[in-house]
Image: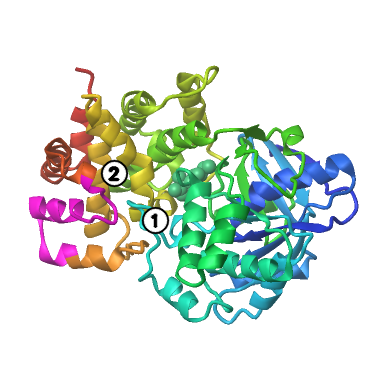
Amino acid sequence: MPVVKRVPSTGAAPQIGIVHLGLGAFHRAHQAVYLQRHLNRRGESDWGLCSANLRSNRTLVDQLRGQDGRYHVAEFRDREQVTLREIGVLRQALYVGEGGHDLELLLQRMAEPQTRIVTLTVTEKGYCLSPSSGQLRSEDPLIAHDLAHPQAPRSAPGIVLEALRRRRTAGIPPFTVLCCDNMPDNGQRTRQAVSALAALQDERLARWIEQQVAFPSCMVDRIVPAMDGESFRRLEQLDCHDPAAVVCESFSQWVIEDHFPLGRPDWEVEGVQMVKDVRPFETMKLRMLNGSHSLLAYVGLLAGHESVFDAVSDANLARLFERYMAEEAAPTLDMPAGIDLSLYARDLKARFANDSLQHRLRQIAMDGSQKLPQRWLLGARQLLDQGRGIGCTALGIAAWIHYCTRPLPGHPMHVIDDPLSATFADLAGRFDGASLVEAFLDLDEVFPAALSERPAFREAVQGAYGALIRDGIDSFLQTFVAPN
Ligand code: CS2
């Protein structure tokens, strides 16, 4: 049995000061924990949360309401040591998805003067931007809906925009918008989504947003697997019978650009790094951590593994991801003094080897079309410019194409969860072998022309895909990672 440190929620019920869009496991285990520590330290706070689920999981919202917004976060250092925190900062939980009637409540809450910050974790695709160019996809069905019904929006940018419109009309200064999703320049991207949507509706509102609204960027980091039967069994062993609980690692990091015109919690006391420029941290995390995750996911799934722990326990895969970090991620990073990338890589290895977390590779593999550009492709361009090899990245892309188009060992009902899944199925039906790879690399939603037009890039991916099909993943990997 592990040693459990229990940390109750203390202090008075906080006033709501932050509205969050995207009430998923990550939000509950990351941002809410920082706000809870703030409350426990001070005994009172006016930075309580109103959090809304925009799509799935009405059950979770009902459960949270039934327990007055209280839930638990189990932070596993390893099998031996766990911290079980009670969270009491979530003051209101709303459901805005299919059949949800809380949209008006949410918009009213966002328009209130005491709401000073709006945060988002709606995943990469929730911003309705093209992954490769970062431009608003005006053909996206959610955006088309919001253009037709601006006052009853369904997309995250549409909801933020409508709330800002109401504040402007009422003469209330705008809240600060803080994106907490894994995208490069995530503040700028969120601004782009909201401003572009505004420009299609009301030029003056668009100008006001441009001039008045702050969209700081931030880098968030904590491994929070989706909850499954196994995680709930773990919790029962800790005598925690909370259907809204989350399991995560003990590591947590948050680096935020310090630009909050209406104020913010004194997060730095809780260990949040408040900085002028988040970009180096964000790029480091996207390419080292998330890039390795995606590599382990696609290659690991083809090799028959289920979780990140299984994948890094395979000596060849462990060597592959170490080599990716050292040779294809780190050389593209330009870090401020004091950040040691080899130390960062060593810590990542230890985090991935945490066997208390059942972090499913299939969870990481979803939405690849949205994730690849920032995790691998921007870096691959730099590597080619520097005259370096892109062997691991090319193998990752080949494994991704394989994953998207062929049956998966051990998963006969394998379904691709990606906004482009219909396109992948179409390509798989029409092409094969090298022509299938060509068709994938021509997807300009994913691959920017500046990369896909480079012969060295195409050759590397073609080479990896050909070898993968010819030799099979195990023998290919064996040769690939063998010392020269
Ligand atoms: C993962 C991330 O699912 C994924 O794509 O790479 O959710 C990862 O676990 C987090 O970014 C860690 O901070």
Answer whether residue 439 is magenta in the image: yes
Q: Residues within 10 Å of mark 1 (few under 14, many from 20)?
A: some
- Specify which label sits upstream in the sequence, 1 or 2: 2
Q: Residues within 10 Å of mark 2 (few under 14, many from 20)?
A: some
The residue nearer to you, when weighing 225 against 434, is 434
The C terminus, quarter of image: top left
Residue 154 placement, left or right of 51: left
Q: Main secondary structure of the magenta part?
A: helix
> In percent of the image, x 54 and y 60: which residue is there?
207
Q: Which segment is the magenta one? A: 427-449
Query: How far across and down, in percent of the image, does residue 28 sit?
Result: 66, 53
Residue 443 placement, left or right of 262: left
Does the image show residue 323?
yes
User: Three-letter amino acid code at disc 1?
Assistant: Met
> In percent of the image, x 38 and y 68: which residue is there?
138
- The picture quadrant where one finds residue 380 is top left
Q: Is residue 339 above or below residue 21?
A: above
Distance of label 1 from label 2 (alpha carbons): 17 Å
Frontmost of labels 1 and 2 is 1
Answer whether residue 436 is magenta in the image: yes
Q: Is residue 55 above or below residue 252?
A: below
> In percent of the image, x 27 and y 35: which residue is there?
381
Q: Is residue 176 above or below residue 416?
A: above
**Pointer 1 residue:** 366
**Pointer 2 residue:** 303
- The picture quadrant where one finds residue 118 is bottom right
